[in-house]
Structure formats: structure tokens, C-alpha cells
Amino acid sequence: LQLSIPPGRMGTVALALSLLTTTLLCPATAMLRVGAFNIQAFGDTKMSNEGVAGIIISILRRYDVVLVQEVRDSDLSAVTELMEQLNSVSTSPYDYEISSPLGRDNYKEMYLFIYRTDVVSVVDTYQYEDPQDIFSREPFILRVSAPQTKVEEFVLVPLHSAPQDAVAEIDALYDVYLAIISKWGTDVSAAGTRGATEGPPARPAPPAAESRGRSGTHRLRLPGRIVVCGARLKRSIVPNSAAIYNFQRAFQLEQEE
């Protein structure tokens, strides 16, 4: 996701990774890039592999705000090392927000948001409550201020669902959307993947996800999904900017890597 920024304001592996991006318009030609990707079982093992860690850092530097999914790092040692390495090689400062471990039974994951502090600030966070246990990992929601962009403020909602739960969880995002509107009244971007086995890019949204009067949402059709809600936010998206970054091709990796 990219948001335009006025000139002069930008500031000077078994690695299973699904990376989604799209772009938002801003007052001029520069863009704020927002992405979401899933690093399979991100933790100390990934960061202890110099080659894998280097690829992750290189990818993160492409974005101003990025959601990392499938973080398994209860003591945050891998996240701390990741941020230290990222800030050591970047000319822009990065910070992060992370959820508590989420999931059923003993398997837990965390949602990690990494963002450039010179262009984005965090206004608030919100852990969505899920008393009916619809979500295997209920969304950890980030409200951000991006004053250099046309939309100025928006909300990011992550979702990492298993393939068998995808339809129900995507449909339940509508209730998350209503809760956010009630709480903050802010435009919303929901980003995430449906798990390890994902459908083809042209696959239409499930009928359930289109029900219940969802005329206020705009779905960018990707193997994962970025769903944008709110008139101002939808108008801010650069047309055809939603894309999947092919890191295997970019880093010349073999399929098994």
C-alpha cells in the first residue's frame, strides 16, 4: 500500500513469505508504501541465519509500514535483533508495535507492525475481543497518523487465518469493521493471508464475504487480501498498485529456499 508524500518530506531461508502491497495517492508523486507478508515461523532460527536475516531486512526496507505475520518469538529476542539490524542499515528510523501471543491451544502467533517513524506515528492500538471464538488469531488493530498523505489517518487490521477458516473469518471482518467505526470512525485497511494454501489471484471473493451490505468495502484481489474501507482511503489508493512482490525472483532463490 503506498500513500503519496510531498517532495522533500520523504527523509533521506526456508523463508515462506507471501508479500502483498498496494499504493495510496498523496499530494504529490512520492509514495508511502504499505505491505503485509507472512514469514513462516519467524523467530530466533530465522534471525540466526545471516542469509535469511539479510533477505528479510532488505524486504522490510522497501516499505514504510509493514505487517509481519506468523511471529513466534515469546521473549521478543528475534524481534529485537530484527529491529537493531534494520535500523543499523536504514537511513530512516523504524519502530514497531506487536500483539500478545494469539491462538488456540498451545500454538500461538503474534502480529508485528513495523513502521518508519519519520512518516508515520501510532495513534492507538486495539486488541479485538472475540468472545465467540470466530478468529483463531483475533486482529490486533493499529491506528496510524500519516499527515503527509491525503487520507491523513487510517487503521490497519491484520488477519492470518487457516485455509479451512478463511470464509468465516473474512466474513467476520465486517464485525471488526463496525467495531472500529464505532470506536474511532476511521477509514480501514485490512490486510492478511489465508494460510499456507492460497487460491489463485483471480479467485472471486466467497459469497459470504460479500453479504450483509458490504457496499462500503473495496476488495483488491490477490492470493492474500488487502481490503480497503472508507471513501477517503479508497480515493487515496494509486490505481493498480496492489501487487505481490516476487522475492524469489528478486533474490534469485530456488523454490526450496
Image: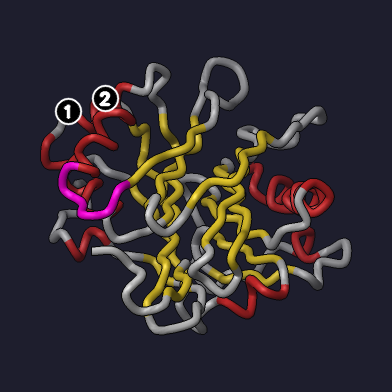
> Is residue 176 toward the left or the right of residue 45 in the image?
right
Residue at position x 35%, y 59% in the image: 63
Question: Which element is circle 1 on?
Answer: helix
Instruction: Check the image and name the residue furthest to the front.
Output: 8
Instruction: Check the image and name the residue furthest to the right.
Output: 212
Residue at position x 51%, y 45% in the image: 195
Query: What amino acid is found at the position of numbered circle 1 in the picture?
Result: Ser
Q: Read off the magenta span.
A: 88-93
**Residue 16 or residue 230, whichever sits in front:** 230
Q: Give x and y (percent) for residue 153.
A: 61, 60
What label does residue 48 carry, if any? Answer: 1
**Residue 223 or residue 88, whichever sits in front:** 88
In the picture shown, does residue 241 fall above or below 56? below
Residue at position x 66%, y 37% in the image: 126
Question: Which element is circle 2 on?
Answer: helix
Figure label count: 2
Magenta residue check for 161: no
Q: Give x and y (percent) for residue 84.
A: 23, 35
Query: Alpha-carbon neighbours of circle 1 within 10 Å: few (<14), some, or many (≥20)?
Result: few
The residue that mark 2 highlights is 44
Residues marked 2 and 1 touching at CB (< 8 Å) = yes
Q: Give x and y (percent) for residue 72.
A: 41, 26
> Is residue 251 toward the left or the right of residue 19 in the image?
left
Question: In this rendering, does residue 163 appear at all?
Answer: no
Query: What amino acid is found at the position of numbered circle 2 in the picture?
Result: Asp
**Residue 241 or residue 251, whichever sits in front:** 241
Report the coloring of the rendering.
secondary structure
> Is residue 250 toward the left or the right of residue 100 in the image?
left
**Residue 138 or residue 117, whichever sits in front:** 117
